Image (tube, grey):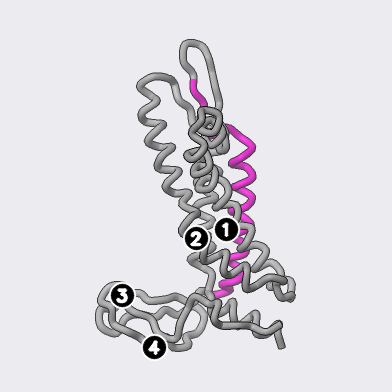
Amino acid sequence: MRIDRHFTYTESHMACPECDLLHLVSDIREGEQGHCIRCGALLFVRHRNSLDRALAFSLTGLSFFILANLFPLLTFEMEGQTESNRLIDGAIAFWQAGYWELGIAVFIFSVFAPLAVLLVLVTLLLPLRLGRAPLFVKLQIRLLVFLKPWAMSEIFILGIIVAFVKLQDFADVGIGLSLFAFILMVIATVMAYLTLDTRALWARLEELAV
């Protein structure tokens, strides 16, 4: 398999996010950090066992995603009637009410994009852990870069919190197990992105391509 570096999203030079000073990205050992020579801002980190840690966080996030879809997200009790809502129920409610555009948007941001990100991470990193090269590595890395801005689950969580506060004026609102699982899924996904070292990823792919 030929590794095409055109698809990596790290370059040989990096601009400081604080002062815009251009730096040459040098090789550093695992566990070390790169800082701006002008302002001292953190530029990049090489985590130890980056690929294994990112895989562990991805599998953890996938497990929490499954739990988040099995149990109620919020429960409402008003005038003796109780109703529970799952994660996907919001998208279904918008669709059935005729607001199909909002239904699709809610489904993409709350269900499809988070799941797709976790699946891409797992299918990319698990073969590497088993000593095999992923079958569609170029497509997987492209998808990973493309899906990252769309998986805005933390925004969805803020919306749930706002709804929880507002609805308490009209009904007794309880938090379901699904909400805790969803929050933990978001944390695991963020940690997977933070610990994934693209240099280690490309180095591992090149090892398997030899």
Q: CA distance from mark 2 to mark 4?
A: 26 Å
* Closer to the eye: label 3 or 2: 2
* Residue 75 appears in the rendering: yes
Image quarter of residue 173: top left
Q: Amino acid at mark 3?
A: Ala
Disc 3 is placed on an element classified as: loop
Residue 142, percent from left and from top: 57, 69
- Residue 80 numbered mark, or none: none
Q: Amino acid at mark 1?
A: Val
Q: Is residue 77 above or below residue 56?
A: above
Q: Amino acid at mark 4?
A: Leu
Q: Amino acid at mark 2?
A: Lys
Q: Which residue is mark 1?
A: 117
Indicate which disc, 2 or 4, sits on the residue closer to the N terminus.
Answer: 4
Q: CA distance from mark 1 to mark 3?
A: 28 Å
Q: CA distance from mark 2 to mark 1?
A: 7 Å
Image quarter of residue 196: bottom right
Q: Is residue 15 left or right of residue 182?
A: left
Q: Which residue is mark 4?
A: 24
For the residues bearing labels 2 and 1, Cβ distance under 8 angstroms: yes
Inspect the magenta stretch and tell me whether residue 77 lies in it: no
Instruction: State which region is magenta.
Output: 48-76
The secondary structure that most of the magenta stretch takes on is helix
Packing grade of label 4 (10 A; few <14, some 14-19, many >=20) is few
- Residue 41 numbered mark, or none: 3
Residue 113, percent from left and from top: 55, 52
Q: Which residue is mark 2?
A: 148
